[in-house]
């Protein structure tokens, strides 16, 4: 079905069965006491699922290179001993795994950080100390020693992290390297650190050991490497002994999205192609590759020799085996939301996945066949209900799902119309197919009667939320509408718009109004033009477009604008709205709504915001549901998702609760 994806790859001393590499992700388990066993289970599940080669999350080769305050380090015999369970379990599952060695340099979130020059990163409050020449030599030796230890631990190789703005990249770029010694100045000097690490790691590990070097195919920052320098670096790294060149896109401090939903699928494969054309060793494409047909296309076009799937493997551990069997409809596609993976890492929680709550919980959330088949009614076909019905039915229960609208998907049906959020449609399609395969009886356009429910053993209430209607004088004015009216196309707002509420949905609604006609977000060329990325990777100034609406967003609290948005994606939303001149007001008091617009008090002064349309994005309340059935009928009731608690509702909690209840019925 996907001939290029499932062609073997001969590395000289080992042959990989296909072209799928599971890319490195910070799972947040690396530094936990039970981390090794949980990581072993996590990776083994992906190895069983058919990934040809897995890359672990990053481990530092020494103390100062740690990324966070907690030790995620690989530098001692004891570390090697502790890690042994990971390669052993992955090998038993039929896979191969390499250990990523990552020195964070100035990106480390602690006081001991070092870098080629003492220049603070814009995304870190700590300023690094400049490394001495002796420290540089020692760091190279630490990488080589860690590589040797990785071999002793049983790993098939290492990946040397030379992209995303970490230490190796900091040596390469003039942006961060102002040294005047043999490690700075001319490109040849700046490349020495990277080259020496590869050369000495190869010496330390011997010939038959995989050394993946992760190269930055595009830096996307001022003062980064130019495209011809990247080509030269690729050749130098190849000559130094790397087996594979994996690619990374953009430094973490780049102000251009690289993996968020706003990035089109496979949107950076063109940059990988340039690296591939420069070298003879296999080159891996990465970033927003989430579907087998896309991976196949990238390989068939000759952009790369392998594809790296990281989040896609969180979303579906069996991505590779399902693709091999041609079961595209059975693949749970990553929707690039970052909500349960990368955003978790930044708040110190282990990574999981919104659409696959089992990810990272392999040892805790176990779906066992039920010894006693029960009849289960699930009321509501949104994220919580879909997740629960799928798990319960797959475990052997007889499940009926009631959805009062005409389609499954709940709030995902609204999300999928937001620019860049089209991927939500994939989740609806996937869960619908899962229900079909598990023989769930789906009843659309109907709510069950209390009598009907009396015939079930278990009832799961997943009826979701209703938009909140705040008590503001004039709220019933004809110009006041809900975000649901706008996103479903029932209402077309006028040129002047005021939005009440600045949570995720307020931002999404503003984006929908501004961009739905102005941008083709799934097209790589349009994306590049939108973010000012030249064909050679150089950056140009972003020109603001002509906004389709003049928008004012309002909130009562004094908290920073967009502070509830995702840690790794919120800045993209804020940047988009800023470029469209959206006005944001906080600390407002709503006085009244009339023909003129909305009247406010702000900082003790009266202010009128003229508006043709006022859109309510003021949060949610649980949808009312006739609980009278609870009394006097037999079934056990379980309330999940927004129906249980609408505050801070998100798809992540809804799907997790659905899976948890589905697993315990
Ligand atoms: P939300 O994040 O809870 O935001 C609700 C907004 O309404 C707040 O800005 C709040 O601001 C305002 N508000 C609350 N009560 C109000 C009242 N009585 N009168 C006037 N204003 C009121 O809710 P949401 O935007 O509907 O999002 C729901 C959930 O969906 C979020 O928790 C999020 O997880 C998820 N989501 C996330 C994203 C994203 O991150 N991109 C996108 C869509 C949805 P003040 O109280 O300051 O006025
Ligand atoms: Fe993909 Fe979102 Fe899951 Fe992360 S949480 S793996 S971005 S679907």
Image: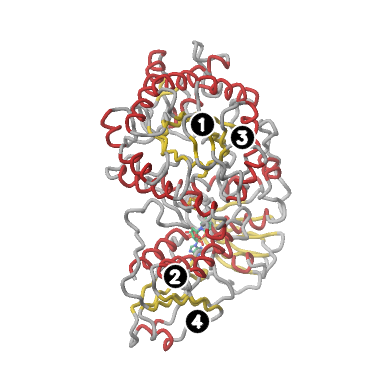
Element at label 1: loop
Would you name the residue on which mark 3 appears? Answer: 272
**Lower sequence index among marks 4 and 2:** 2
The picture places residue 149, in percent across and down from the top left corner, at: 33, 27
Residue occupying the point 55% across, 58% down = 327
The dot on residue 447 is 4
**Lower sequence index among marks 3 and 2:** 3
Q: How far apart are marks 1 and 2 (CA)?
A: 44 Å
Q: Which of marks 1 and 4 is in front?
A: 1
Residue occupying the point 38% across, 28% down = 65
Q: Is 479 on the left or on the right of 367, as rendered?
A: right
Q: In which quarter of the image is residue 369?
A: bottom left
Circles 1, 3 touching at the beta carbon (< 8 Å): no
Would you name the residue on which mark 2 appears? Answer: 389
Q: Is 500 on the left or on the right of 134, as rendered?
A: right
Residue neighbourhood size for the residue with mark 2, other residues' Cα within 10 Å, grouped as few (<14), some (14–19), many (≥20): many
Q: Which of 598 and 390 is in front in this view?
A: 390
The dot on residue 326 is none
């Amino acid at each position: 079905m996907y001939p290029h994806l499932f062609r073997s790859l001969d590395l000289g001393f080992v042959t990989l069965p296909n072209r799928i590499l599971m890319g490195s992700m910070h799972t947040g388990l690396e530094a936990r006491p039970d981390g090794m066993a949980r990581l072993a289970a996590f990776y083994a599940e992906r190895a069983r699922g058919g990934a040809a080669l897995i890359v672990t999350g990053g481990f530092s080769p020494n103390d100062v290179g740690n990324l966070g305050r907690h030790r995620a380090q690989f530098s001692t015999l004891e570390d090697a001993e502790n890690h042994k369970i990971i390669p052993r379990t992955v090998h038993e599952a039929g896979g191969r795994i390499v250990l990523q060695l990552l020195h964070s340099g100035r990106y480390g979130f602690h006081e001991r950080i070092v870098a080629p020059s003492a220049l603070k990163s814009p995304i870190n409050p700590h300023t690094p100390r400049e490394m001495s020449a002796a420290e540089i030599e020692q760091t190279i030796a630490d990488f080589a020693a860690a590589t040797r230890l990785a071999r002793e631990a049983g790993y098939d190789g290492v990946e040397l992290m030379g992209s995303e703005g970490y230490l190796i990249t900091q040596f390469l770029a003039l942006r961060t390297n102002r040294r005047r010694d043999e490690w700075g100045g001319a490109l040849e000097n700046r490349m020495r650190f990277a080259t020496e690490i590869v050369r000495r790691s190869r010496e330390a590990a011997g010939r038959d050991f995989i050394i993946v070097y992760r190269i930055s195919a595009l830096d996307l920052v001022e003062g980064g490497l130019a495209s011809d320098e990247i080509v030269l670096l690729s050749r130098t790294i190849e000559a130094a002994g790397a087996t594979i060149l994996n690619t990374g896109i953009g430094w973490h401090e780049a102000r251009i999205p690289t993996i968020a939903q706003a990035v089109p699928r496979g949107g950076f494969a063109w940059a990988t192609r340039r690296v591939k054309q420069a070298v003879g060793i296999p080159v891996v494409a990465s970033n927003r590759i989430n579907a087998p047909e896309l991976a196949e296309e990238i390989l068939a076009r000759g952009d790369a020799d392998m594809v790296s799937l990281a989040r896609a493997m969180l979303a579906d551990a069996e991505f590779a085996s399902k693709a091999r069997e041609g079961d595209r409809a059975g693949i749970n596609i990553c929707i690039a939301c970052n909500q349960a993976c990368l955003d978790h890492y930044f708040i110190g929680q282990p990574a999981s996945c919104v659409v696959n709550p089992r990810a990272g919980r392999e040892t805790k959330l176990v779906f066992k066949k039920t010894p006693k088949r029960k009849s289960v009614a699930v009321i509501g076909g949104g994220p919580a209900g879909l997740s629960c019905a799928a798990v319960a039915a797959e475990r052997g229960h007889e499940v009926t799902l009631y959805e009062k609208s005409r389609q499954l998907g709940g709030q995902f049906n609204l999300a999928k119309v937001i620019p860049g959020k089209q991927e939500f449609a994939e989740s609806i399609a996937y869960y619908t197919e899962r229900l079909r395969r598990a023989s769930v009886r789906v009843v659309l356009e109907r709510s069950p009667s209390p009598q009907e429910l009396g015939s079930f053993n278990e009832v799961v209430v997943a009826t979701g939320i209703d938009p909140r209607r705040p008590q503001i004088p004039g709220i019933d004015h004809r110009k006041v509408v809900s975000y649901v009216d706008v996103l479903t196309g029932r209402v077309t707002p006028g040129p002047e718009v005021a939005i009440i509420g600045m949570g995720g949905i307020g931002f999404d609604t503003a984006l929908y109004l501004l961009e739905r006609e102005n941008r083709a977000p799934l097209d790589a060329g349009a994306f590049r033009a939108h973010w000012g990325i030249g064909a050679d990777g150089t950056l140009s100034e972003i020109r603001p477009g002509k906004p389709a609406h003049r928008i004012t967003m309002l909130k009562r609290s004094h908290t920073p604008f967009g502070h509830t948005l995702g840690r790794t994606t919120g800045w993209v939303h804020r940047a988009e709205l800023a470029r469209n001149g959206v006005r944001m007001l906080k600390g407002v008091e709503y006085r009244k709504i009339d023909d003129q617009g909305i009247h406010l008090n702000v900082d003790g002064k009266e202010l009128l915001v003229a508006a043709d349309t006022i859109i309510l994005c003021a949060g949610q309340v649980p949808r009312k549901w006739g609980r009278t059935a609870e009394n006097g009928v037999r079934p056990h009731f379980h309330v999940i998702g927004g129906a249980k608690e609408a505050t801070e509702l998100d798809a992540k909690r809804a799907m997790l609760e659905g899976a948890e209840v589905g697993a315990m019925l």
